[in-house]
Image (spheres, grey):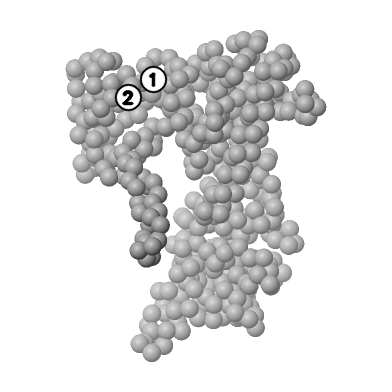
Amino acid sequence: MDSKLLNLCYQIFKPRINSSIEKMKDKLGDRFLTIRIGHSKTISLSNLYNCFSYLLSIGFAYSNNSSRYFNDSDFSFLTPVFDINYFVEGFIKNYDIEIEKANELIELFIFKPKFMKKSLDIFSQPLIYVGDNQVVFCPHLIEQMNLERIVEKHLNAFKIQLSSKGTNLENKLISIMNFAPFFKVNNTKVKFIAYDQKQVEYDMIGVMGDKILLIEMKCLTRPYSEYEIHEKEREILNGVEQVNRREKILINQPEKVQKYMDIKLPTSSPTKDDIIKIVCTDIFDFTGRTEGDVYITDTSVFMRFFLDPNFEQIEVHGEEHTVINVESLYNEKPSSMELIEYLKLPFAVKPYFSNLVEEPQQLLMLSEHSNRIAFKDYIIRKNPFEKSSRIKPSTKKIGRNDMCPCDSGKKYKRCCGR
């Protein structure tokens, strides 16, 4: 392929590539520069993004130039077959990379049968191997690549541990929460051999009024399939087990925990009623879920409660934006109950959950003798934001026992007046 044409295509995808790189740098921190993957352990993430750029460019160029050859009797141009060496040679020519590394990079994007190698999936490896060193080239698969997903899947495939990134996430949250009003956070390492003769280390301990917050941090890669969601769920449940164990240790050995802290616990003999347990992640998929008395959330939702509790409802007309209502998560000082209610139903998802309607669904009967089987389904019958768009600014003071103006049917103190 002509280098000038390839460079032109590269300029088209440059913003997309750079955006993805920034996202991964934000997620991985300094490790973005040091991580190496591939069987030789020499492939950097910058190398991987160069290969993204190359494949996206030739996919776009092919899609936009091959249409002139289409006819009603020959559709082979839609998904042509190329020798793998064609991609390797083009990559070497345009990106000045060694042949061994070029071969290994292209190999990372080839989907092969399981008996040949352990592959990912065709959305992560869009070059489909068909034998004799040849692959099917499908431009549409290439153009739809989710770059962050593919990077994360390769990190998982080569067993790159993200535990250090979890520590970075923990330190970042602790640093930010030091500026939060109504919340004190411990800044020292709490690590010792507990009464069960096993080592324990607390990720984050905070104090809010008379409550102790035990927060377990989980740094997770974003799931993109039902299988991946199930895998991440197992990690979440592992976090639930960990924070429950730490609660038991705090109740049994409060003086030991206090010894390593730089803030004072509100009580020297804490009970379960004195403790709020949270599993905090950097993804949104499990936010709002509860496991027993453990609340699962994400860092942005957790920080917002303390640092930015006001939410604006905005009406948009063309280019004009009008603030029609401002709601706050609490009045002056938050209570522990308000925090718990917020963790169970964050403001961002509240409109959706508030408009869910239970609707039984019956499965199709295959014959008149089939058992009648039904399941409980939930649907959204109403636009979650329709009510908000009708709210008008009002100078009338709303009493806490008045009905809420958002039409929820609840008293103001139980709804928007929280």
> What is the quadrant of residue 131 in the picture?
bottom right
Residue drawn at 28 percent across, 25 percent down: 410
Q: Is residue 4 visible?
A: no
Amino acid type at circle 2 is: Cys
Residue 10 x %, y %:
49, 64
Front residue of 378/226: it is 378
Amino acid type at circle 1 is: Tyr
Residue drawn at 67 percent across, 23 percent down: 248
Q: Is residue 209 above or below residue 227?
A: above
Q: Quadrant of the C terminus?
A: top left
Residue drawn at 42 percent across, 84 percent down: 75
Q: Is residue 373 above or below residue 68?
A: above
355 on left or right of 47:
left
Residue 330 is tagged as: 1
Residue 325 x %, y %:
26, 28
Front residue of 123/271: it is 271
Residue drawn at 69 percent across, 15 percent down: 254
Seen from this angle, which residue lies furthest right? 197
Q: Secondary structure at mark 1?
A: loop
Residue 134 is tagged as: none
> What is the quadrant of residue 337 in the picture?
top left
- Badge 2 density bin: few <14, some 14–19, many ≥20, Cα 10 Å: some
Q: Is residue 409 visible?
A: yes
The residue that disc 2 covers is 415
